[in-house]
Image (cartoon, grey):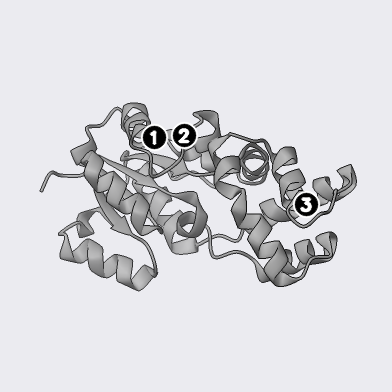
Amino acid sequence: MNSIHAVLVDYGQVLSAPPDPAQWQRMLEITGFDEATYSSGYWAFRHAYDRGDINGVDYWREVGKSAGITFTPHQIDELIDADVELWTRLNPPMVEWARRLQAAGIRTGILSNIGDAMTDGLLRKFDWLAGFNHHIWSYRLRLAKPEAAIYAAAADGLQTPPAQILFVDDKPENIEAARAFGMQAIQYTDHSLFLQEMEARSLTYLLDPSPRSAPFVP
């Protein structure tokens, strides 16, 4: 197995924790939808939003239309804000790991399926995202995982051969696509299981690499 020269991670449910139930409830209250109606609309148009086929405002218009509702501009603003907050609870062990990698001079990147308004919200909230060497926010490329071209763009951005990149994502289809492209990849479902998998692959040297510079501070 090739040694790892760069680590590429997903944002949602890897760097972030699972969605915040309080913000989900907030969105239910804004829309007035029941759980089933809202969940159906929220996910039906999400891939198009993440891929950049529609922007954040149009995404919420489509969610509303799916239930026969036209959201007001104020409702859309509120929903965009709540949607950002939904995904801003962090997963501390993985954020700290990214810091350690960066302090050791190991190249790091983010490869996230995410729309324009969501990206803008995260970048405003988290200065530490700038510590990654390369970012791929899917909407900017009009691509989304598991399309092979988005992995090629990530490898190019990291200036690292695919076989020397470790990719971490929560979705099995994205992991399979990364492996098909030639990356080493681990599905993240639980931190203890992630550590076990790193050990099984003899990658524990990456977990606490020797620092070469001071870590960034969020």
Pick whichever, 119 or 146, lies toward us: 146
Q: Tell me the CA gap for discs 2 and 1.
A: 6 Å
Instruction: Looking at the image, tell me whether mark 2 or mark 1 is earlier in sequence order.
Output: 2
The reply to whether residue 141 is in sight is: yes
| Residue 106 in which image quadrant | top left
- What x and y, as percent, mark residue 215? 44, 45
**Going 60% across and 53% down the picture, which residue do you hit?**
44
In contact (CB < 8 Å): disc 2 and disc 3:
no
Q: Name the N-terminal-most of marks 1 and 3.
A: 3
Q: Amino acid at mark 3?
A: Gly
Image position of 214 with respect to 209: above or below: above
Q: CA distance from mark 2 to mark 3?
A: 25 Å
* Residue 166, visible in the rendered structure: no
Residue bearing mark 3: 64
**Crowd tier of the residue under label 1, counting other residues whose Cα lies within 10 Å: few below 14, some 14–19, many 20 or above:** many
For badge 2, the amino acid type reads Leu
Q: Amino acid at mark 1?
A: Ile
- The single residue placed furthest to the left in the displayed view is 1
Q: Secondary structure at mark 3?
A: helix
Pair 2/3: label in front? 3
Q: Are marks 2 and 1 in contact (CB under 8 Å)?
A: yes
Front-lying residue, 144 or 154: 144
- Between label 1 and label 3, give the one nearer the viewer: 3
Q: Relative to 77, does residue 204 appear above or below in the rendering?
A: below
Q: Which residue is under mark 2?
A: 143
**Secondary structure category for the residue under label 1:** helix
- State the residue position of label 1: 150
Which percent across, then down, holds residue 78? 82, 51
Asked whether the beta carbons under mark 1 and mark 3 sit within 8 Å of each other, the answer is no
